[in-house]
Image: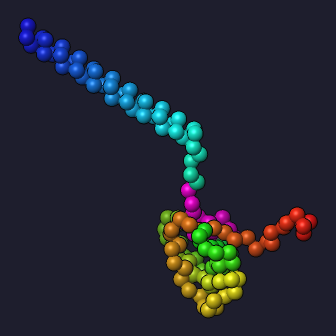
């Protein structure tokens, strides 16, 4: 009779363990979803290849800048080489500071695969006064 008691005790213990572990994960999901409902998800920043992948000729001739650079500081892309997965690569361009080329030479763009790039549109920004 002692063996039956142990088996019953083990099955009860396993059942209790399973019920506790499933409720903790379910409540964890509920807590995460409630936190997500109150807070908007952060938008993933883009690396240089993500920024130029939809531009014609892979962005050759486009102006790109890192998000933390001052205004009118950018690279004008002259050449792009992609790796096999087409999500990473290398790029070359002319560095401009204050809107003017700094050296005028083509140089390799550093930090191409870091997620901090933005596209700079050539179209002048319209204001209410200019309309």
62 on left or right of 116: right
Residue 35 percent location from the top left of the image: 52, 39
Closest to the observer: 31 or 75?
31
Q: Tell me which corner region of the image, top left, top right, bottom left or bottom right, holds residue 40.
A: top right
16 on left or right of 95: left
Q: Which residues are magenta?
A: 44-58
Q: Is residue 53 above or below residue 23?
A: below
Q: Residue shown at 27%/25% (left/top)? A: 17
Q: Is residue 43 above or below residue 38?
A: below
Residue 30 percent location from the top left of the image: 48, 32
Q: Residue shown at 69%/78% (left/top)? A: 72
Q: Is residue 12 above or below residue 54?
A: above
Q: Residue shown at 56%/66% (left/top)? A: 116
Quadrant occupied by the C terminus:
bottom right
Residue occupying the far left of the picture: 2
Q: Residue shown at 15%/16% (left/top)? A: 7
Residue 38 in view (yes/no): yes
Residue occupying the far right of the picture: 131
Closest to the observer: 113 or 89?
113
Quadrant occupied by the N terminus:
top left
Check if residue 10 falls in the magenta segment.
no
Residue 78 in view (yes/no): no
Residue 127 percent location from the top left of the image: 85, 66
Residue 29 percent location from the top left of the image: 45, 34
């Amino acid at each position: 009779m002692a063996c039956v008691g142990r088996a019953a005790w083990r099955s009860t213990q396993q059942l209790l363990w399973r019920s506790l572990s499933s409720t903790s994960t379910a409540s964890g999901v509920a807590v995460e979803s409630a936190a997500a409902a109150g807070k908007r998800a952060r938008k993933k920043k883009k690396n240089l290849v993500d920024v130029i992948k939809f531009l014609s000729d892979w962005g050759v001739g486009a102006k790109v800048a890192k998000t933390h650079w001052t205004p009118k500081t950018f690279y004008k892309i002259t050449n792009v080489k992609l790796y096999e997965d087409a999500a990473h690569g290398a790029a070359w361009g002319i560095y401009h500071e204050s809107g003017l080329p700094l050296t005028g030479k083509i140089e390799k763009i550093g930090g191409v695969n870091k997620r901090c790039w933005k596209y700079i549109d050539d179209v002048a920004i319209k204001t209410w006064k200019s309309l």
